[in-house]
Image (cartoon, rainbow, N blue to C red):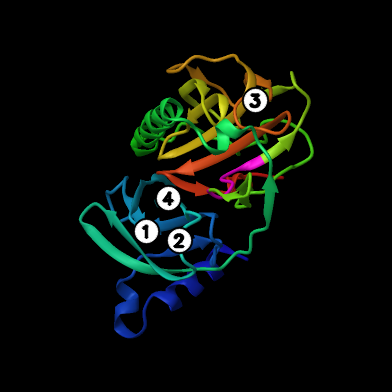
Amino acid sequence: MSYARIAALAALLLCSGPARAQMPEVMMDPLEPRVGDIVRLSLRLPAGVKTGEATLAGRTVPGFETGGLLNVYLGIDLDVKPGVHEVSYVMGAERGSLPLTIKDRKFESESLEVAPEYAEPDKKTQARIDREAKELDEIWSRVTRERLWGKAFVRPLAGELGSSFGLRRVFNKQPRSPHAGLDIKAPIGAEVFATNRGTVALARDLFFTGNTVIIDHGLGLYTIYAHLSRIDVDAGAPVERAARIGLVGATGRVTGPHLHWGVKVVGARVDPATLPGMLM
């Protein structure tokens, strides 16, 4: 679908009558995203304005300018209810809002048996889990307002896909949080690469995800690489697109070797397959 047609459809959704002429030129891609998707919002910037931001479901994401457009990648979290939601935006002195229709998405479920300590941790282990959860929340809340990537995102390694994004999981007969990423099957020692340019936000062992690397790509977008057998980068270091960051392993809560690959946008859990430019 052409840019002009998408903009025209979006304009019809936004308003009618005399107010239509006052609305900014708008593009949504996709027009009706699903729960767990990343959606690109593009708005024509007012004259002389180069920056702006948009908010969806309480998460504010800064954008970047290209060709007079403000581009914002918004994440639709797994817990967002399908239906019509409001996206608000700020571009200099200009403020407004527009509707975004979020479509439902059906997720599969699976039951797994894991070591008892991963299903029913003791007090000491639970204290560690709580500390790590707080640390991760602090990372997701930090928004680098600069876009650190310039090219399309790529897969971190080749391999058959395992557990899917959004999978509803039951560990040792106890329901747990949905699977907030994609699993890629690979043998221990297979090389893992950064999906795009960024800065390493975390590189160490965590209870559930084992040896873990988190990369900040700017604009609130982070990628996660978990269960590694070895980490080859340090926290705070810059990393280039397709640079090796570690090796596949089976550390943390796993039933076999694989890479868990996750993405968050200002804390929203989103499908890696919907990263900008991603070809799965």
**Which residue occupies the foreground of this view, 85 or 175?**
175
- State the image coordinates of residue 73 (x, y, percent, origin top left): 46, 49
Q: Earlier in the sequence, mark 1 or mark 4?
A: 1
Q: Secondary structure at mark 2?
A: loop
The amino acid sitting under disc 2 is Val
Three-letter amino acid code at the position of disc 4: Val
Tell which of 171 and 123 is nearer to you: 123
* Mark 3–mark 2 distance (CA, rounded to whole Å): 30 Å
| Placement of the N terminus among the 4 image quadrants | bottom right
**What residue is at 64 percent from the left and 59 percent from the top?**
107
User: Which of the labelled discs sits on residue 276, or is there none?
Assistant: none
CB-based contact (under 8 Å), mark 3 and mark 2? no
Q: Residues within 10 Å of mark 4 (few under 14, many from 20)?
A: many
Judge whether 260 appears above or below 85 on screen.
above
- Residue located beneath label 2 in the image: 80
For mark 3, give the secondary structure: strand
Q: Magenta stretch?
A: 177-182
Q: Which residue is mark 4?
A: 72
Q: Is residue 95 left or right of residue 178?
A: left
Are circles 1 and 2 on residues that touch, CB within 8 Å? yes
Q: Position of residue 159 (x, y in %)?
A: 78, 35
Q: Position of residue 63 (x, y in %)?
A: 38, 46
The reply to whether dot 3 and dot 1 touch (C-beta < 8 Å) is no
SS under mark 1: loop
In the figure, is residue 64 to the left or right of 22? right
- Crowding at dot 2, Cα within 10 Å, few <14 / some 14-19 / many 20+, comes out as some
The residue to which callout 3 is attached is 193
Of mark 4 and mark 2, the one earlier in the sequence is 4
- Residue under numbered circle 1: 57
Q: Amino acid at mark 1?
A: Ala
Q: Nearer the viewer, residue 63 or 35?
A: 35
**How many labels, in total?**
4
